[in-house]
Image: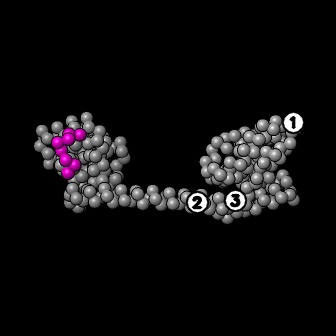
Amino acid sequence: MDKEFLPDSIDERIESFLRGTMTKEEEAAFKQEIRTDPELRSRAKTMAALIRGFQDTEGEREAKLIGSATQERRAVASVADKEELSQGNIRKIVRWACSIAAVFLIFISVYSERQAREMEEMLSPYYSAYSDTDISRGEVDSVVVSHLYDLFRRIPVQRNMSAIIQELEPIYNSLDSDYTFYPFANDIAWNLALAYIKDHQIDNALVILDKLKNDNPETPISAKAGELMKRLKER
C-alpha cells in the first residue's frame, strides 16, 4: 500500500471509488492499486461488504470490486439511498462487528469450558483405577496390557480423545473374533464408551453401553452401564 496515504485518506479513496465520485484517471489508478496491493484490496473488500450489509459471499465481493466498479457503485448506491454512509459510519460498523465477534468468541469459550466441566463431573464416578501391578502373566503379553491400561488411565485426564479412540476402536471391534484381549473385554468396552462420551459421540457410546448391559445381566458392570445410559439420555 502506498505509504504516502494515511489510513483516513485510504478510507476516503475507497469510499470515493465505491460511490463512483472518482475521475476516470483516479479510478483507473485506484483499480490498478487494488490489483497489486493485497492489503488495500482486503481493506476495500471489507468496506464494500460492510456497506452492503454483509450480503455477498467472499468470491462475489472480490469479483464485483476488482472486475466491475460499476456494479460496486450500484450496490453501494442502493444502500446509500436509505442511509447516508460517512467514513465515521463505516468505522462505527467495523467497531460494532469486531465487538460482536469478540463477545461471540468469549461466549463460545466460556460455554465450551462449562460443558467440559459438567461432562467431567458426570463421568468422574465412572472412572476406574488401573495399576500395572494387577497384571498377571499369561497368554497376553504384559507389555501390551500395560499399554492398554495406560490408555484407560489417560481418559480421565485428557480432553482430546481422538488418539485413544483410534487405538481402542479396532481392539474392541476384534473382540468377537480375536480372543487375545477377551479377559479385558468389558474394560475395553467400558473405557471406549467413556472416550466416546468425552468426544461427544454419544450414540456410539450408547450402543456399547447397551451391549455391556445386556451381555452382563445382574452384574455391577451391567448396573453401571444402565445408570450411565439413563444419565446420558436425560442430558
Give the distance between the C-alpha atoms of the residues marked 1 and 2, in whole angstroms: 42 Å
Instruction: Give the vertical position of 222 relative to 171 (above or below).
Output: below
* Residue 185 is a magenta residue: no
Q: As drawn, is 129 to the left or to the right of 3?
A: right
For the stretch drawn in magenta, what is the main secondary structure?
loop
Could you tell me if residue 223 is visible in this image?
A: yes
Secondary element at image label 2: helix
**Observer-nearest residue: 211 or 110?**
110
The amino acid beneath tag 1 is Glu
Q: Are marks 1 and 2 in contact (CB under 8 Å)?
A: no
Instruction: Give the vertical position of 25 relative to 212 (above or below).
Output: above
Residue marked by disc 1: 139
The amino acid beneath tag 2 is Gln
Secondary element at image label 3: helix
**Could you say where residue 223 lies in the image, as x and y percent from the top left?**
81, 60
Label 3, residues with CA under 10 Å away: few <14, some 14-19, many ≥20: few
Secondary element at image label 1: loop
Q: Which of the two labelled residues, at mark 1 and mark 2, occupies the earlier sequence position?
A: 2
Give the distance between the C-alpha atoms of the residues marked 1 and 3, in whole angstroms: 32 Å
Q: Residue at x 24, y 45 (%)?
A: 71
Q: Which residues are magenta?
A: 1-8
**Could you say where residue 45 lies in the image, as x and y percent from the top left?**
29, 46
The amino acid beneath tag 3 is Ser
Q: Which of the two labelled residues, at mark 3 and mark 2, occupies the earlier sequence position?
A: 2
Q: Quadrant of residue 232?
A: bottom right
Give me the disc on residue 115: 2
**Could you say where residue 73 lies in the image, as x and y percent from the top left?**
22, 48
* Residue 5 is a magenta residue: yes
Residue marked by disc 3: 124
> What colour scheme does the image use?
one colour
